[in-house]
Amino acid sequence: MKVIWPISELRQGDNLPGSIMVFSSLLSRNGFQSEVLPDDPATIISALKPGEPAVLAFSCATTTVARYLEVNRRVKAKRTVFSLFGGVHPTLFPEMIEEEGVDALCVGEGEGALIELLTNLSEGRSIDGIQNLHIKREGQVYKNPIRPLIEDLDSLPVPDHKIFERAIPRTLWRTLVVTGRGCPYRCSYCSNDPYRAIYRGKGRWLRRRSVDHVMEELGALKASRRYEFIRFVDDIFTLDQAWIEEFSEKYRRIGIPFGCLTRANYVKEPIVRCLAEAGCWSMSLGVEAANDRIRNEIFNREMTKDEIIRACEIIKKSGIKLGALNIVAAPDSTLKEDLETLEFNMRLKPDYCSVLMLQPYRGTAIYEFVRKRDLLEDDPINLSWAGVNLRSFIKYPTRIEKLKVENLHKLFALVVHWPWLKRFLGPLVRLPLTRFYYWFYRRMCNYQEYFIATPLKIGLRNIVKRSRLYSWIRG
C-alpha cells in the first residue's frame, strides 16, 4: 500500500515537516511505500493508478487545513483513496473528522497508529479500534483513546531525508533536524501546552534522542554531499548542557555549518562556546516583546529583560550570528508597546531579526484570552501561510491604529538592520501601503536568511541556483 504526503509550498524547500521524515523511515521498515508530492490535485491524481490502494496523508497546521481539505476532495473525486489527517490542528480539533472526505484523523503522535492502520487496511482487518485515530465509516465515527507517549525516541528509525530529496531534486541544499520532543514552558500563543494536556498521565513529556542516534542521521546527511547547512529546530536546543557537550564533540567530524533555536535563560557561556567550536553559525532566541506586561502576562514567557540582554551578549561575544525573534500586534497592546520592542531590538543589535504578527490560533491560551475580551476580528483558521504575515486578526480601537501596527510589522526588520530608517517610520506606517511593504518584508526575510543566518558564500551560491537564468542554463 502506498502513502502520499501532499505538501503546501513544497517548491521552497523550507519548513519541511520533520515528522514525515520519521514516518517515511518507519513505513519503509514495515514494508510500505511513501512519497512526498506538491499539494496539486492534478499531480497527485496522475501519480495514482486507478484502483491502486493508497492513503492520502496530510500533516496539518491551522494555516493549511482549508487548502488540504479542498485538495482531498478533488483527488477523491477522481481516485479511490483513504484520507488521513494528522498534525497540530487535527489533534486540537478532532471534530474535523466530520468534514467531507475525511476518513480518519490522528490525535497526537502518529507513528504507532499509522503502521497499525496500514497493516489492517492491507490485511482487510477492522480499523475501527486503533488508538489515536478517529475513524469515520458508513456515517459512524469511532473515537479511540490515545496510546502513551513514545518515551524512547531511539526506538524510532533515523529520519529519511531522501523522501524530500526526491521531491525537490535541485534546490534542496539545507535541511532540518529534530533531536527531541516537548517543551517545558507554556507560552500562551504556542500549541505545546494544550498538546501536553492531551497527554497528561500518558508518559514523560520532555524526551530527547541520544547523541549517537542524532549522529547517525547527520552522518547520512554528510555522506549525501548535498547539504550545506543544517537547521536544528528543537524549541530549545540548549536545554541540556551535558547533551550539548557530547553533541559538540562528536559534531566536529560532520563539519556542516548549522543554526539552532534557544531561550534566553538556557544561554550559558560554556554551552555557547561548545556550539561555536562545533561549527554553529547562527542562534535565534525569542525576545518576543520588550514590554514586561506583554511578554510575561500576555505571552507567559516567564523571562526578564536582563536575561535577554545577557543571553544576547553571550551569543554575540562567541562569534555566532544572533537572531532575535519578535511578536507584534498582541491583544490588549498598542503601537507604542510594539515600538518599544523595535527600540529594544535596536539596543540588542542582533545580526538578524524575525517579527511575526500574533495570530490567536484556536486551542491556545491566547485564543481564550482574546475570545473572552471580544478582541477577535476574524478566525485565523481562514489564514493561508502568506496571510499569517499580511494582517492582524485582533481588533483595534480604530482602523488607522491597526494599519500602523500592520505596517510596522512589515518595516520592523528593515529598521532594526538599518537604524537610520527610524526617522521616516512615523509617516511611513500611516500610509495605506501594507501590501507594498509586504514585498519589502519578504525580500528582507530572504536577505537575512541567505546572507546572514547562513554563511554568505553558501547563501549566495544557492540564490544563484534558484534563479531562472541558472535553471535555463542547466536545462
Image: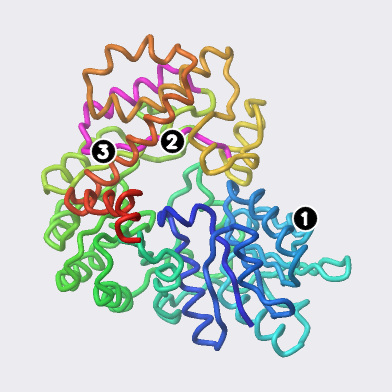
Q: Is residue 334 magenta?
A: yes
Three-letter code, disc 1: Glu
**Residue 316, quarter of the rendered image:** top left
The one of 287 and 473 positioned closer to us in this rendering: 473
Which quarter of the rendering shows the N terminus? Answer: bottom right
What residue is disc 1 on? 99
Q: Residue 262, percent across and down?
A: 31, 50
All told, the count of numbered labels is: 3
Q: Residue 401, percent across and down?
A: 51, 14
Q: Residue at x 42, y 63 (%)?
A: 168
CA distance separating discs 1 and 3: 42 Å
Q: Along the horizontal axis of the image, is 226 left or right of 378?
A: left
Mark 1 neighbour class, 10 Å CA radius: few under 14, some 14 to 19, many 20 or more: few
Q: In the rendering, which numbered label is found on residue 352?
A: 3
Give the structural element (helix, strand or loop) at label 2: strand
Considering only order in the chain, which callout, 1 or 2, is on the residue closer to the N terminus? 1
Q: Residue at x 53, y 29 (%)?
A: 391
Query: With respect to residue 223, does 188 lie above or below?
Result: above
Q: Residue at x 22, y 31 (%)?
A: 348
What residue is disc 2 on? 356
**Residues rendered magenta in the picture:** 333-360
Three-letter code, disc 2: Leu
